Image: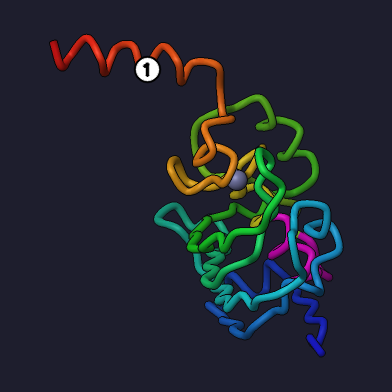
């Protein structure tokens, strides 16, 4: 069972703290809709640091895999998870100020009681494709030629090439 960690995020960043562990995919409730099976574990490292200008930051690293349901053929496939995100800890007023800004690191609220599991789940969700699918060529539907009507046109083109 995953022990829920709460950190004082600013203190965590200023003192360069680090938290590492493993989280079961089954323990991420918001992820379940995308999964073919609640299998797999994700290793994580959360590191606090201050960037060059002294801003409090968190770096989140996650490695592992989860079993997503392909949105084309609905069968499961292993999706490798390798992500690194850097998040700037901002006060609530700053969050609003910068919400329209595209540049720079993502900002999260500098929570004194930050739920690490919820943060990890959020970062993982953000990293996943909007409609997860098998890689090209690996999808069962595509293999049966049911993928797109465009396949016929492709065959014609291939035929032309041979002439
Ligand atoms: Zn598929």
Q: Position of residue 16 (x, y in %)?
A: 53, 77
Image quadrant for the N terminus?
bottom right
| Secondary structure state at the residue bearing disc 1 | helix
Q: Position of residue 3 (x, y in %)?
A: 80, 88
Which quarter is ligand 1 in?
Answer: top right
Residue that carries the numbered disc 1 in the rendered image: 154
Q: Is mark 1 within 8 Å of ligand 1?
A: no
Judged left or right of residue 26, residue 135 is: left
Question: Can you say whether 140 is above or below 100 in the image?
Answer: below
Residue 44 placement: quadrant: bottom right
Q: Which region is colored magenta?
A: 111-122
Judged left or right of residue 55, residue 38 is: right
Q: In the displayed image of the protein, which residue is found farthest to the left?
A: 163
Judged left or right of residue 27, residue 157 is: left
Say few, some or many: other residues with alpha carbon within 10 Å of mark 1 (under 14 / 14 to 19 / 20 or more). Answer: few
Judged left or right of residue 154, residue 129 is: right
Q: Position of residue 20 (x, y in %)?
A: 59, 84
Image quadrant for the C terminus?
top left
Q: Nearer the viewer, residue 62 or 101?
A: 62
The residue sitting at 73% across, 72% down in the picture is 25
Residue 19 placement: quadrant: bottom right
Residue 121 on the magenta span: yes
The residue sitting at 71% across, 30% down in the picture is 97
Question: Can you say whether 43 is above or below 85 in the image?
Answer: below
Q: Nearer the viewer, residue 57 or 70?
A: 70
Q: Position of residue 77 (x, y in %)?
A: 59, 59
């Amino acid at each position: 069972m995953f022990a829920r960690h709460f950190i004082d995020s600013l203190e965590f960043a200023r003192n360069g703290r680090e938290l590492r562990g493993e989280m079961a995919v089954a323990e991420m409730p918001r992820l379940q809709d995308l999964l073919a099976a609640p299998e797999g574990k994700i290793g994580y490292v959360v590191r606090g640091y201050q960037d060059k200008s002294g801003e409090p930051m968190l770096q989140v690293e996650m490695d592992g895999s989860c079993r997503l349901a392909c949105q084309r053929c609905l069968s499961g496939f292993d999706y490798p998870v390798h992500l690194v995100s850097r998040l700037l800890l901002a006060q609530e007023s700053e969050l609003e100020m910068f919400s329209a800004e595209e540049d720079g690191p993502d900002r999260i609220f500098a929570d004194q009681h930050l739920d690490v599991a919820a943060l990890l789940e959020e970062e993982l969700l953000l990293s996943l494709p909007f409609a997860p699918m098998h890689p090209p060529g690996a999808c069962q539907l595509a293999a049966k030629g049911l993928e797109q009507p465009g396949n016929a046109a492709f065959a014609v083109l291939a035929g032309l090439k041979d002439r």
